Amino acid sequence: MGTILRQSYLDKIERYLGKDTIIILTGQRRVGKSYLLRMFRDKVCNDEHANVIFIDKEKHEFDDINNYRDLNTYIDENRNHSKTNYILVDEIQDIEDFEKSVRSYYEEPDVEIIVTGSNSKMLSSDLSTLIGGRYKEIYIQALSYKEFMQFHQLPDSDDTLTKYIWYGGLPGLLKMGLDEQDVREYQTDVYHTVLFKDVIMRNQIRNVPFLENLVHFLADNTGKIISANSIAKYMKSQGDNITSTVIINYMKFLCDAYFIHKVNRYDIHGKKLFESNDKFYFEDNGLRNALAGGTREGDIEKVIENIIYNHLIRLGYEVSVGQLQAGEIDFVCTKPDGQRFYVQASYIIADETTREREFGNLRVIKDNYPKYVISMTPLVSRQDSAGITHLHLRRFLTVGLD
């Protein structure tokens, strides 16, 4: 099996080298952060002027590095002052007070620091206080559709897109193959690892059965507007008497682990964000499908919406849910320069009722920002209708919005 590059991420890493910046690769476990760090390590090792100090906290040989003092000792023992020292630490959040060690080395003229972490708490107030804004977070996502094709050596086809929709983009599937039973077993293992290490242990959760029920509820309601109060009422009907505060905390823990993502609602006419009732999407649609169970043909629109959301983030947009007085826009997408556009996600637009639902809400918006409908409607590649562009999902995932 040859080396498969995720070049866009490697380019981002190299862009910030030599700038007195700590580079932090963040994202859910098993999306490829460790792989990228090892790829960078292997590349740097070819430089005779480089000294690589590599620590992988998921390997038993590094079990003795438990706190920042242990980390300092290991770095000092392996440092070479005549070379550029690349300090690479995988899953650094497992080292207590790691930020103290990072602070003490990152300004050294012969040091570059790149670390990975699977919980956003590593970018908490403590880290920000100690090193200020002198770090660059690079968010690593599960495979894009184009990467999925490259990893599995598949052509761009409806069959490949179907595999991507149902199995998702965890890089580890390359070794497992795309047999459904093997895929689901692997995804279940990843789910339990993320939940145990990055949610339950990190936050000392005691009510594990409720947490698992909550995750399954979110899988069943992907892309729906929900609130902590509505979840509490539903859970009470199922025999779980849980307060809204606990639910809010548990959902935050899941977001901190990059397992799910919360998307706020945006009032398109009033130009403001609402403070409650959000949508939630999963980092990997394959994990979501494994949790939802069954063939779930009726869930196809939820999964498509999840995939579109993740790809919009991959393209660099901030994404909100658009709220109109008489309806909803799936996504309001913006960039720091003020660029904005609107997106509706659909499965197949086969009749006038569906067309009016998807296109009609966009027509209500009277500004001149671009508007898109993305679907799997057969024979559609790109069509423009009264200022609204209709794109096939495959086209969007391969060439973007062009």
Image: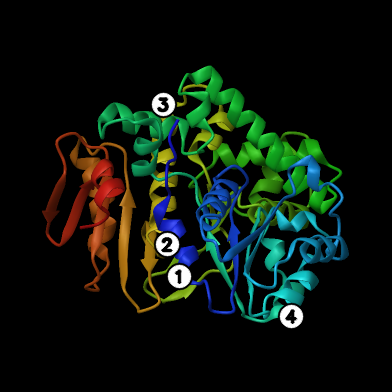
Mark 4 and mark 2: Cα distance apart in space: 28 Å
Residue 343 pos. (x, y %): 32, 57
Give the numbered dot on residue 311. none
- Closer to the chain start, of discs 4 and 1, is 1
Residue type at the position of mark 1: Arg
Circle nearer the viewer, 4 or 2 = 2
Q: Which residue, given by chain and number where applicable, does mark 2 sit on?
A: 11
For the N terminus, which image quadrant?
top left
Q: Which residue is located at x 50 percent, y 54 percent?
A: 43
Where disc 2 sits, the SS reads helix
- Residue in the foreground of this view, choosing between 7 and 42: 42
The answer to whether the residue labelled 1 contacts the one labelled 2, judged by CB atoms less than 8 Å apart, is yes
Q: Which residue, given by chain and number where applicable, does mark 4 sit on?
A: 129
Residue 299 pos. (x, y %): 44, 33
Can residue 305 be seen from the camera position used here? yes
- Closer to the chain start, of discs 3 and 1, is 1
Can residue 235 be seen from the camera position used here? no
Q: Which residue, given by chain and number where applicable, does mark 1 sit on?
A: 15
Residue type at the position of mark 2: Asp
Residue type at the position of mark 4: Thr
Q: Which residue is located at x 80 percent, y 62 percent?
A: 77
Image quadrant in which you'd find residue 206: top right
Q: Which residue, given by chain and number where applicable, does mark 3 sit on?
A: 297
Image side of residue 141 versus residue 156, left or right = right
